[in-house]
Image: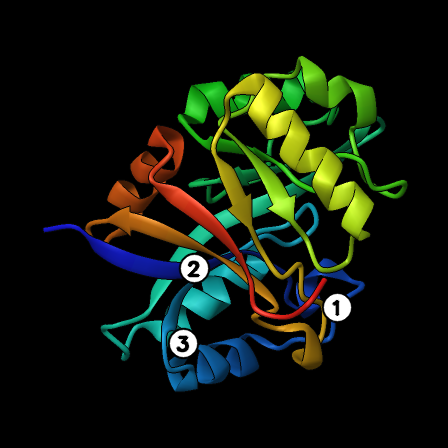
Amino acid sequence: MTEMIRIDLHLHTKFSGDAQLSPKQIVNELHAHPFIKGVAITDHNTVQGYFQVRGLAEPHEDLIIIPGIEVATPDGEIILLGVEEMPKYPLTVEGVIDFATEEAAVIVLPHPYREMGGLSDLAETIQAHAIEVINPNSTREENKMAEGLAKRRNLPEVAGSDAHELSQMWAAYTEVEAESNVHEILKAIKGGQVKPVASTEI
């Protein structure tokens, strides 16, 4: 039976290198939140944080932890959801997309027009399943441009906090209409049963 599940689809642990959030903090904050009960751990080029968060979340049956990774390529960053390992090197856009296709991963283009890490013009043509249209670390204009991209390409629109520290958590999230398990949630994202939400003014 499907339900409305609220998930932060872009969050970093201390294993990203530029973030301070510990896996324990993430699980505690997620457990305490009144309605956001899912998170995708999307560390930079590592899945180590995901496994720690998943392990700590196991006692809490209502929490959903989605495996993911934010892969840095020379041309920009790409989020893969549903993978539990790093792509093989070299990390080119083509190589990452090939890996994602082999693994049946959900390909999300995060902050496509941000100066740091955005794919810019490549985002117009690169294979993807969804576009991140709300990122609190992007400007309002950059988010609007991402929204326009999603509409032009007729791709689902998602959101995530891109949190690197405690004060940034839950600033944006995605409502997903799906059964409460990772496989069905990923399928719903691909199918467009999603709605991006900003918790705070961006």
Question: Which marked residue is nearer to the observer: mark 3 or mark 2?
Answer: 2
Image coordinates of residue 21 in percent, x first then y, are 66, 75
Distance between mark 3 and mark 2 Cα atoms? 18 Å
Q: Residue at x 64, y 67 (%)?
A: 13
Residue 119's x, y, as percent? 78, 29
Q: Residues within 10 Å of mark 3 (few under 14, many from 20)?
A: some
- Mark 2 vs mark 1: in front: 2
Residue 52 visible from this viewpoint: yes
Residue for badge 1: 19
| Dot 3: element | helix
Q: Residue pushed farthest left?
A: 1
SS at mark 2? strand
- Above or below — where is 94 with respect to 24? above
In this rendering, which labeled residue sits more in front, label 1 or label 3? 1
Q: Residue at x 55, y 23 (%)?
A: 128
Residue lying at 9% horizontally and 51% vertically, measured from the top left? 1
Image disc number at residue 7: 2
Relative to 119, 170 lies left or right: left
| Amino acid type assigned to the residue bearing label 1 in the image | Ala
Q: Residue 56's mark?
A: 3
Give neighbour class at mark 1: few <14, some 14-19, many 20+ (Cα, 10 Å).
some
Q: Amino acid at mark 2?
A: Ile
N-term-proximal mark, 2 vs 1 = 2
Residue at the spot x=53%, y=76% of the render? 26
> Image height check: is 191 above or below 173?
above
Q: CA distance from mark 1 to mark 3?
A: 19 Å
Q: Looking at numbered disc 3 in the image, what kind of residue is underneath it?
A: Leu
